[in-house]
Image: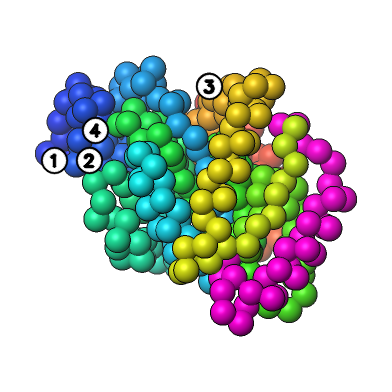
Amino acid sequence: MKNYKSKNRLNAAEYINGVLAGDRVLLSRAITIIESNLTSDKKLAKEIIQSILPNSGNSIRIGITGVPGVGKSTFIEAFGKLLITKGHKVAILSIDPSSQRSKGSILGDKTRMEDLANLDEAYIRPSASGDTLGGVANKTGETMFLCEAAGYDVILVETVGVGQSETAVHSMTDFFLLLMLAGAGDELQGIKKGIMEMADMLVINKADGDNVKMSQMAKRQYQNALHIFPLSESGWSPLVSTVSAIKNTGIEWVWDEIGNYKKLVYDNGYFIKNRNRQKIQWMYNNINDSLKELFYGSKDIKNELNGLEKKVISSEISPVKAAENIIKKFKASF
């Protein structure tokens, strides 16, 4: 594999010092390196992450998800502006859908959150979801560390939406917020039990105008549904609320309750336990990524796979047997 080197790269110390000084330009450039697939950038990324690690972790990490059209960007903009008025620095890591055909991504959250994007205390970083399940970019975890080291004490991770696996964002955040809509038919239809079980709070957005009554009805239905779930390991009982991001109502209540959650899990030890679990998961994610890269990056494996594909298509060999053969060849190379 050739080691292509990107132009205009600084040394690791310059990125590290820039991030720790809160330089938004160098923070963005450092994140670009973290997300890069270039061999030279991967080495640089490891140096940066290792050095800034002691300065990370000083934030509340909030995952925000919901079906498309629920108003995630509008909610996050109103929420972020509230937090800034309270003296916080907010980083929004918004994961945009990638086209499965072109692999391209719109990356339009800075446009959708124009007011928030113009505030010095806010940092919005859109990234493409790629092939990652749950709508979380491969390097979202590392990006969070960089933002924390840059002084952002509230990290909001906005996912593509529900439908695949939301465990990815849940496993890297402290608080999981599920945005819902009322008036879309059966309020519980299409909402997977697993997603609701993971949620620390259900927020029914767009509770304004003619939708207020339906939102209150949906709130009661969700509250009843949550009663069937066992108490989570954190000791927190999930809450349901209605908000209007456009009217800016109910937003402050959400933040107050997140504060109550944080105090509870700090006091009972769950916060640290969960953070430690996240670090271990991060290690295994990197192991899995490295093994996958090692496997598919091998020229011999690529050649062997091309031949096996033809044999599988012609039914000369079963997919199971083909997989077994290629793994044997890979293991024999060590």
Q: Nearer the viewer, residue 197 or 116?
A: 116
Q: Are marks 2 and 4 in contact (CB under 8 Å)?
A: yes
Q: Are marks 3 and 1 in contact (CB under 8 Å)?
A: no
Query: Which badge, 4 or 3, comes first in the chain's sequence?
Result: 4
Q: Are marks 2 and 1 in contact (CB under 8 Å)?
A: no
- The residue tagged with tag 1: helix, strand or loop? loop
Q: How is the image coloured?
A: rainbow
Identity of the amino acid at label 4? Gly
Q: Nearer the viewer, residue 312 or 188?
A: 188
Secondary structure predominantly adopted by residues drawn in magenta: helix
Q: Quadrant of residue 316?
A: bottom right
Residue 206 in the magenta stretch? The answer is: yes
The dot on residue 7 is: 1
Q: Residue at x 60, y 29 (%)?
A: 263
User: How far is disc 2 from disc 1 in space, using C-alphas?
Assistant: 20 Å
Residue count near mark 1 (Cα–Cα under 10 Å), binned few <14, some 14–19, many ≥20: few
Examine the rendering and report whether any part of residue 49 can be seen: yes
Extreme residue toward the bottom, this view: 210
**Where is residue 60 shown, x and y percent of the image?**
49, 35
Residue named by callout 2: 24
With respect to residue 215, does 33 lie above or below? above
Extreme residue toward the right, this view: 228
Magenta-colored span: 205-234
Identity of the amino acid at label 2? Arg
Residue named by callout 3: 334
Q: Quadrant of the N terminus?
A: top left
Residue named by callout 4: 22
**Where is residue 186 shown, x and y percent of the image?**
77, 75
Identity of the amino acid at label 1? Lys
Q: Residue at x 70, y 75 (%)?
A: 214
